[in-house]
Image (cartoon, rainbow, N blue to C red):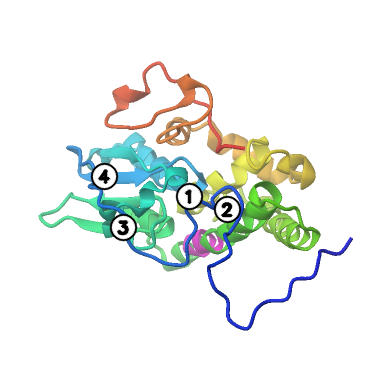
């Protein structure tokens, strides 16, 4: 059935409220909306985030670095509640002018500096600690290709499929079909690759897996966008499922997935993270809100 016809006006304006789950915070303008300073802890890295797929990229990376013995990667993680518009506070906008989580403040040197956008955070940390990113040019190029494949693919799965299938106030056939098709194509790309190799960039666990896992795993596990797993027939991607299970068995991944998580059972939430002791008594299961 075709959608109702919409005729765009000659010049678009923001007079019409953008509906859906995030209608209360959506605006066509950038910049701070209120004065709000960010908290700062004692560790070299200050992360301001939420346990959405993009946020989990950063926390898994930091936990993996610590698991590998890089004690200089100690961090404080502070929750930014995007549903409440906390990403538009002046302190957060000062770190990320795009007002998206995650954002990182690197205080490990004499002059603190910001790193924003999840892909940039991963590459920065990998280069700083010499971990999860090969130095051999060919292998490095393969890893970075899969990292930036994910950065380009995420908006189709989240802002595209996720929005129109789960969050939009009306369910229209065309956008749901368009983004369902693209999400399945993304899974097919990953599944074909993982039929050839153990991990996305080859035989070694790398930045490519850390970047892609937080997006592909929730679909595979069935805990994102309501019944998206069934709707998209995600069970057919057997190689992705094998890869998800292997990565999710890693202790650092299990820890990283609950940092800045503020939904679900209380013992699976960790609103703030300041040391390894904060995980005591926590049940290490996760997933973004459905």
Q: Main secondary structure of the magenta part?
A: helix
Residue drawn at point x = 27 percent, y = 38 percent: 76
The image quadrant of residue 38 is top left
Seen from this angle, which residue lies furthest left?
A: 110
Question: Which is more foreground, mark 2 or mark 1?
Answer: 1
Within 10 Å of disc 4 (Cα), the crowding (few <14, some 14-19, many 20+) is: many
Q: CA distance from mark 4 to mark 2?
A: 29 Å
Q: Secondary structure at mark 4?
A: strand
Q: CA distance from mark 4 to mark 1?
A: 16 Å
Q: From where the camera sits, is residue 9 visible?
A: yes
Within 10 Å of disc 3 (Cα), the crowding (few <14, some 14-19, many 20+) is: many
Apparent side of residue 18 relative to residue 235 in the rendered image (left or right): left
Range covered by the magenta-colored residues: 142-149
Q: Cβ–Cβ below 8 Å for labels 2 and 1?
A: no
**For marks 3 and 1 on the same chain, the one whose residue lies earlier in the sequence:** 1
- Disc 3 target residue: 93
């Amino acid at each position: 059935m075709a959608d109702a016809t919409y005729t765009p006006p000659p010049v678009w304006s923001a007079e019409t409220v953008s509906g859906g789950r995030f209608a209360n915070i959506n605006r066509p303008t950038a910049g701070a909306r209120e004065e709000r300073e960010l908290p700062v802890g004692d560790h070299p890295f200050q992360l301001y985030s939420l346990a959405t797929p993009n946020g989990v990229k950063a926390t898994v990376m930091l936990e993996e670095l610590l698991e590998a013995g890089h004690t200089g990667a100690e961090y404080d993680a502070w929750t930014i509640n995007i549903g409440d518009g906390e990403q538009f506070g002046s302190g957060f906008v000062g770190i990320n002018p795009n007002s998206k989580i995650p954002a990182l403040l690197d205080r490990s040197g004499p002059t603190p500096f910001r790193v924003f956008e999840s892909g940039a955070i991963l590459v920065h940390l990998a280069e700083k600690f010499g971990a999860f990113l090969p130095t051999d040019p060919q292998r490095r190029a393969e890893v970075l290709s899969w990292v930036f494949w994910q950065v380009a693919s995420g908006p189709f799965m989240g802002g595209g499929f996720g929005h129109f299938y789960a969050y939009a106030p009306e369910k229209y056939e065309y956008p749901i079909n368009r983004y369902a098709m693209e999400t399945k194509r993304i899974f097919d790309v990953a599944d074909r690759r993982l039929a050839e190799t153990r991990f996305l960039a080859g035989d070694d666990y790398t930045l490519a897996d850390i970047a892609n896992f937080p997006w592909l795993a929730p679909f595979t596990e069935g805990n994102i966008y309501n019944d998206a797993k069934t709707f998209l027939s995600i069970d057919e991607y057997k190689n992705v499922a094998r890869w998800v299970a292997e990565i999710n068995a890693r202790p650092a991944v299990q820890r990283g997935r609950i940092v800045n998580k503020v939904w679900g059972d209380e013992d699976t939430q960790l609103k703030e993270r300041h040391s390894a002791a904060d995980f005591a008594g926590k049940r290490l299961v996760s997933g973004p809100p459905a």
